[in-house]
Every structure is written in C-alpha cells, then in structure tokens.
Image: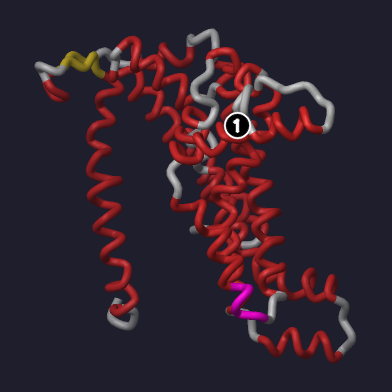
Amino acid sequence: MRKNRFLLALTLPMVVYAFIFSYTPMFGAIVAFKRYQFDKGILGSEWVGFSNFKFLFTSPDLIRIVRNTLGYNAVFIVSTVVVSVTVALMLYELTSKKWLKMYQSIMFFPHFLSWVVVAYMVYAFLNPRSGILNDWLTGFGFEAVDWYNKASAWIYIFPIANLWKVIGMNAIMYYAALLSVDPTYYEAAKIDGASKWKIITKISLPFLYPLMTLLVILAIGHIFSADFGLFYQVPMDSPTIYATTDVIDTYVFRALMHLGNIGMSSSADLTKSVLGFILIVTANAVVRKIDSDRSLF
C-alpha cells in the first residue's frame, strides 16, 4: 500500500465513482422480489418471491430474444477484436503523424455520437423512398428495398453499425499497447530479414494478446446485455422486423411501458447480471488455466 500509494491515489476517483453509481444502487435489486407500489416505496412494497421472474422465463418469445442477444453479441465480440486489431496494426505502420492524427480523429468521432443521432444517419441511408442506398440500387437497375420491413437485412446492418461506432475507441487502445513495445524488437527482426507478416505474428500480436484477452473476458460478462440504443433506436422499433431486431433489453422495455411493472423489468435485469457474473468468472477461470498471466484475476 505504501509503495503504490500514488498509483492507488490515481484510482481513487474511479473507485468512488463505481461505488456511488454501481454498488450503491444495487440495494434496489430487491425490487425484483417485490410487487412494487409507488405509494409504499421499495421497503414497504409486498414481497412476492420469485414471481416476477416468471415474466421472462415463461415468455413465448424467450428463445427468440435470447438467441438474438447472444448471437449479435458473439458476432460483435469477434468482429470488434479482429477489425480493431487490424486497424491498430495499420495505424502503427503509418510514419506520417499528420495522417495518423487525421485517421484517429475520423475513427474516434463516432464514439461520441448518441445512437439517436446515429439512427437518423442510418435512416438517411435506408429510407425506403429517398434513402441514399436505395438511390444507388435503383441507379444500378435493382429494385428499392424497404429496409425497415425486411428482417433478414438487419443481421448485417447491426454488426456494421456497431463496428462503425466502437472501432475507433478499441483501435486506439490496441494502438496504445503497440506503442509500449520496445522498438528494438522490430529493429532486430528487420535485421534478421523477417517479413511484415512475421513481425506482426511473432512480435505485435503476442504483445496484444493480454489486452485482447482482457477485453474479451469483460465483453463476455455483458453478453446477455444488448446495447439498447443500437437495437431500439436504429431500427426505429419497427414491429415487422422483431424476428431479428428484438433482444432482451428492448423486449423488457416494451413490457415495462405496457405493463408498468417495475418488479418484472428488475427481475430480468438481475437475471442478466447474475448470468454475466457467472460467465465472466468462468471465462477468467478458463484463461487462468491456460495462461495465468493473462487472466483478469
């Protein structure tokens, strides 16, 4: 503690933030076991045990929303890692600082946009009548597509939109990790006549593996949680494409809006948190067994 007191002091603001906004509100999890009434409050509301959990587990749409949630998140995890690492490696090869800063700014900018803004940008492309994409299709002799009534198309639209939004932040993290690599490794490899591919596979990627493992473990812990803005705002909550756009978060939100039962929505969120905790501990245990130096804890 004494030796690392300055490093610990740097973490203090984040520890306080996490305690206030992440741990203190956990008291409200008891709402999942109560029939919440506004006039009685959390403590005064009636206990109903696990009755609220029946809402999610007995839903006829359970298989669909769980399939969509897990499927999309699995695709997001794999595609984000692959594309972000590739972009980071490409940025590392740039020698011009001017171009490097420009590329970083362009890719990082979408991270600051809300999904509401992105939804209207996507709508400008996919508008059935005047969208840019349909203009291109008709210009090449194809028929215009009503994207907001074509469920199968969103299997590809979501991963593309997610990549566009998050790739900048992730690529910069991997790029920062590459900057920490001792340049003498690369110099020695070039002297020995190593090709670009050999340098990437034998030097760059091994140094990125710990960060890649860490981010994947954390992402697995959120695999049951979907980005509400992406899945609700971008498809404009179109009922005709729920088959491929409906996930646990959007399903629970609509149920809360129609039923007004806070206990049911809280039980669904608590279930996701418990499953996420189990998955992150399991994933970390697997990584620790393979290579203990790369595990989260």
The secondary structure type at the circle numbered 1 is helix
The structure residue drawn at horizontal position 69% and vertical position 76%, both measured from the top left corner, is: 94
Residue at left 32%, top 67%? 11
Q: Is residue 92 above or below residue 152?
A: below
How packed mark 1 is, by other alpha carbons closer than 10 Å (few <14, some 14-19, many 20 or more), is some
Q: Of 79 and 156, which appears nearest the observer?
A: 156
Q: Is residue 293 visible?
A: no
Q: In which quarter of the image is residue 74?
A: top right
Query: Residue 16 placed where, x, y %?
Result: 24, 58
Magenta portion: prevailing SS class: helix
Is 168 drawn above or below residue 281 in the view shown?
below
Please tell me which residue lies in front, 260 or 99: 99
The residue stretch that appears in magenta? 96-100
Q: In the rendered view of the protein, which quadrant contains the N terminus?
A: bottom left
Residue 185 shows in the view: yes
- Residue 257 x/y as whole percent: 34, 16
As shown in the figure, which amino acid type bears the numbered disc 1? Leu
Residue 97 higher or lower than 218, as above or below: below
In the image: residue 64, left or right of residue 51: right
Q: Mark 1 points at which residue?
A: 70
Query: Left or right: where does residue 155 sit relative to residue 108?
Result: right
Residue at (24, 39) in percent of width and height: 25
Magenta stretch encompasses residue 22: no
> Residue 262, image x and y in percent?
28, 19
Q: Residue sitting at 58 percent across and 47 percent down?
A: 283
Q: In which quarter of the image is residue 245?
A: top right
How many numbered badges does the structure rendering display?
1
**Could you say which quadrant of the image residue 294 lies in?**
bottom right
Where is residue 210? Give x, y as percent.
Answer: 61, 64
